[in-house]
Image (tube, rainbow, N blue to C red):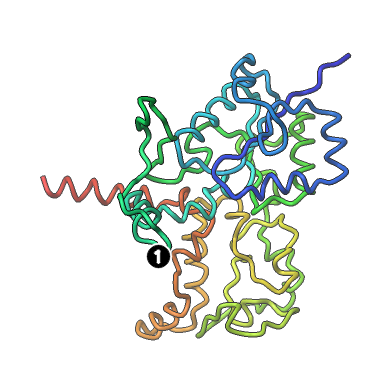
Amino acid sequence: MATKPKVAICWLGGCGGCDEAIVDLNEALLTVAEALDIVLWPVALDYKYDHVRAMADKEIKLSIINGNVRNSEQEEIAKLLRQKSQFVLGFGACACFGGTPGMANFRTKEDIFNWVYRDAPTVVNPKGNYPQPKSTVDGRELTLPEFFETVFALNQVIDVDYYLPGCPPPPNLIANAVTAMLENKLPRKGSSLAPHKALCDSCSRNNTKPAKIQLNEFKRIHEIEAKPDICFLAQGVLCLGIATRDGCGATCIDINMPCRGCFGPVEGVKDAGLKMIATLAAMIDTSNEAELEKIAAQIGDIAGYSYRFSLPTSMLRSLSQSAAKKGEEVGQ
């Protein structure tokens, strides 16, 4: 009897929606479970990390890892699964780009701890306790995972073979990706297992999009009653479909909500946020600097809007580090 390929599914820093997306395979999940030997899936099965540690290196055919890396426990598990796996699939926006938790990188670790354990209006903490990696209680040492200074995407911690973006990825792409990896029908390493065109190209409203979009006003979706069959951008509503990878099935568009960018940038784009900011800038119909600032201000939190899912993988960190290094050199 042939041995079934071993598969691990693991949730690091995230909301759990990616695990739920796997459950949403419904009846197909029974077929998958019959064909595979699932050796780790903490949200559904009672296997322990020691069970994985006891395996030979590369014994697992495929590890499907969702969520980003924010603490030392998540880093340890990611590295363990990398060691034991032939393939690692970065699953979901948090694993691929850092996801919405990556927005925390706009703040320092100190800022976050002060808010959560001291300043938030519902906090009651008269002793000013903050979580410590090690503490002693009744003579016994207790430990907690170390909270890192920043959020990391999965490939900033371990080598990742393939990516499946989305918040969460849709069932059809999950089934296609798992089948391709188990049957060794794969594109080049590092590829995204999602379409390579922009969502705008397959959007049902595309035929209402002007050949050249020129805007002198930006609106958020809650500010108007958007027409359900007209391009959002043609209505002046911010929609990131023009600079976002296709593959989601346009589920947000179908309920009259503009794209938020969870599938990340299209092929060849290194920085999703910069691409979106450049795209929006090209749409603004004025060359007057004062008017330009007034129109841009209507967007509000442009950095948060453009980097909602991708801040940890943006170029902002490297640019900031380069600027800091240059400043130090000038100071010398």
**Residue beneath the point at 43% across and 77% down:** 296
Judged from the image, the secondary structure of the residue bearing numbered disc 1 is loop
On-image quarter of the N terminus: top right
Residue highlighted by disc 1: 121
Residue 130 vs 45, above or below: the answer is below
- Which one is in front, 13 or 326? 13
| Image coords of residue 82 (percent x, y) | 57, 27
Q: Is residue 264 left or right of residue 31?
A: left
Q: Is residue 71 left or right of residue 13?
A: left
**Residue beneath the point at 63% across and 21% down:** 52
The kind of residue tagged 1 is Pro
**Residue beneath the point at 45% across and 84% down:** 286
- Which one is in front, 271 or 153? 153
On-image quarter of the C terminus: top left
| Image coords of residue 22 (percent x, y) | 74, 44
- Which one is in front, 323 or 256? 256
